[in-house]
């Protein structure tokens, strides 16, 4: 059997790493969204189920707002542990800022 090309070998070595990094980031995003829904005084999920478009747009904006810093931490990190640490830090900071704004 011929040896695969260097490109195929690089893909075979890198793809599982990519999946692990992306998977950790998506899990952090899901957990952050769940925490946001729990922390907010509004019951967005109930409002969305009732057909409230503004609540759906608001939650969508929150997801984008959480995803952008997570994407930056994903880009800057070199391993899964760094992604987890920096991802958690970005989420905690964002949720703390959200809570401080809600109290005003």
Image: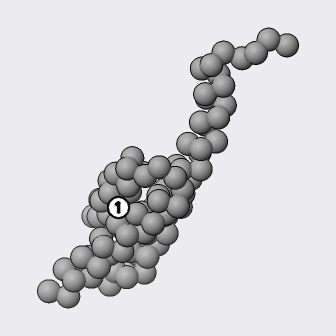
Query: Is residue 69 among the parts visible in the rendering?
Result: yes
Query: Is residue 42 among the parts visible in the rendering?
Result: no
- Identify the residue at image location x=62%, y=19%: 6
Outermost residue toward the left?
104
- Identify the residue at image location x=59%, y=36%: 14
- Viewer-proximal residue, 74 or 96? 74
Mark 1 residue element: helix
- Viewer-proximal residue, 14 or 26? 14
Q: How is the image coloured?
A: one colour
Outermost residue toward the right?
1
- Viewer-proximal residue, 58 or 34? 34
Q: In this view, does 91 lie to the left or right of 96?
A: right
Residue 20, placed above or below residue 84: above
Q: Position of residue 97 (x, y in %)?
A: 24, 76
What is the quadrant of residue 96 in the picture?
bottom left
Q: Quadrant of the C terminus?
A: bottom left
Q: Position of residue 15 (x, y in %)?
A: 61, 37
Q: Position of residue 100 (x, y in %)?
A: 21, 83
What is the quadrant of residue 29 in the picture?
bottom left
Q: Name the residue under label 1.
A: 66
Q: Position of residue 34 (x, y in %)?
A: 46, 72
- Identify the residue at image location x=42%, y=63%: 87
- Identify the residue at image location x=49%, y=63%: 84
Disc 1 crowd rating (10 Å Cα; few below 14, some 14-19, many 20+) is many
Q: Quadrant of the N terminus?
A: top right
Residue 12, placed above or below residue 66: above
Outermost residue toward the bottom?
103
Q: How many labels does the image show?
A: 1
């Amino acid at each position: 059997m011929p040896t695969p090309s260097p490109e195929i070998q690089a893909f075979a070595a890198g793809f599982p790493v990519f999946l692990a990094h992306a998977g950790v980031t998506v899990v952090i995003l899901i957990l952050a969204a769940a925490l946001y829904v729990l922390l907010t005084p509004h019951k967005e999920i109930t409002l969305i189920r009732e057909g409230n478009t503004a609540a759906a747009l608001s939650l969508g904006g929150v997801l984008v707002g959480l995803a952008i810093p997570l994407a930056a931490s994903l880009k800057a990190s070199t391993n899964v542990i760094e992604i987890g640490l920096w991802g958690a830090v970005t989420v905690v900071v964002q949720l703390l800022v959200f809570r401080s704004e809600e109290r005003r």
